[in-house]
Image: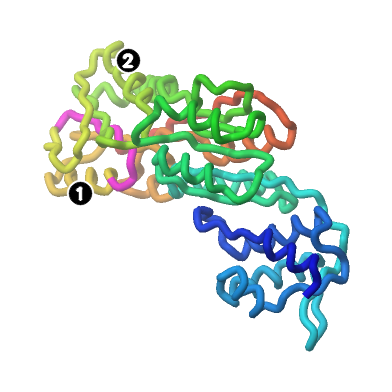
Amino acid sequence: MTNRISDFLKTIKISEFSATPKYQQLESTIVDAVKHGALVKDDMLPSINELSVYVDISRDTVEKAYKILKAKGVIASIPGKGYYVATNDVKQRQKIALLLNKLSAHKKIVYDSFAKELGEDVALDLFVYNSDLSYLRTLLGNMTKIYDYYVLFPHFKEGRSQAAEVINKLIPKGKLVLLGKYIEDIDYDFPAVFENYEKDIYGALKEALPALRKYETLKLIFPDNSDYPKDIIKGFYKFCQQNNFHHLLVSNLRKEKIDVGTCYINLAEDDLVELLNKITAKDLVVGKEVGVISYNETPLKKFIWGGITTISTNFEYMGKAAAQLIQQQSKEHVEVPFYLTLRPSV
């Protein structure tokens, strides 16, 4: 084994914190090594078994990475001898870390749109920090790569007031992109694609006002210890007070008694199932005796009970816009469209 290959092996770091599959991390590491001259054309690579043992990953993981690299023309193979570097001509690829507070159907829409707009010439690593600021701090502090951009969904269950401090300390200046929620007190200019939570819910409910007039009370299901922005509550209260609705927050839906003449605004998908079960158990007529509005549009909601009314961000737009800001090297702040889809549940 040549000194160059030995030196290359020492640089391989597979992150256990990353949600990006290990085979993609390995593939990206080899591409970067070729790009920076750590590996050059005709260098023989370690065998699948050797690399598996050295990096402590499965043989299948190494084999999958090699197959991808071979398909891209970065490496080639000789029967009986093994794999070797096929070219020095590897495109400069941006490295981007996408930091999600949690996995969900809606975050997947953002991810897919973001990745599609960026294209294949970008190495995109995915991390999930479970809305835990302490875990995000640990994750950023233990990253093994230096990224061109850190794209962050800054939603936290606790410690929101410390978020700017963590970002300023651990994300290099000029490399931050915020998604979903805007944060004040960042020490430098940065691009952002954000939701205006207070304005969005207020505007959506205002648009639904004629249909809502059949209800005396509006209730917002806002679970305790959630990572949902408190600005949603502000917009809800503002709408109810200006339009003379009785209004309450529901922090624990399991304890809630479903009342006739009430319209429920639901945030979490799990709570929507619980809410519908409770309404069914009381044999109430949705859209007449009780109303339901759900956050975040999904294909199924137009079929449930003849259609569940939704208020939703355009998640596809969010991912695409973030990618375009990176491509344009823009520091613009873009507000994501928010819309009401009125259906018979109100």
Tell me the tag on residue 314. none
Which of the pair 5/153 is nearer the observer? 5
Q: Name the residue at 80% across, 78% down.
A: 77
The amino acid marked with disc number 1 is: Asn
Tell me which corner region of the image, top left, top right, bottom left or bottom right, holds residue 271: top left
264 is within the stretch colored magenta: yes
Residue 215 visible: no
Counting from the top left corner in percent of width and height, residue 319 is at 59, 40
Name the residue beneath numbered marker 2.
238
The picture places residue 52, in percent across and down from the top left corner, at 61, 74
Circle 2 or circle 1, nearest the eye: 2
Above or below, comparing residue 231 to residue 88 in the picture: above
Q: Which residues make up the magenta segment? A: 260-270
What distance separates the C-alpha of mark 2 from that of mark 1? 29 Å
Quarter occupied by the C terminus: top left
Instruction: Please determine whether, in this image, residue 78 is positioned above or below residue 307.
Output: below
Residue at image location 47% in from the left, 44% down from the top: 138
Where residue 302 appears, as percent x and y from the top left, is: 40, 45
The residue tagged with tag 1: helix, strand or loop?
A: helix
Mark 1 neighbour density, 10 Å: few (under 14) some (14–19) many (20 or more)? few
**Residue with the mark numbered 1:** 277
Residue under the image location 43 percent in, 35 percent down: 155
Nearest to N terminus: mark 2 or mark 1: 2
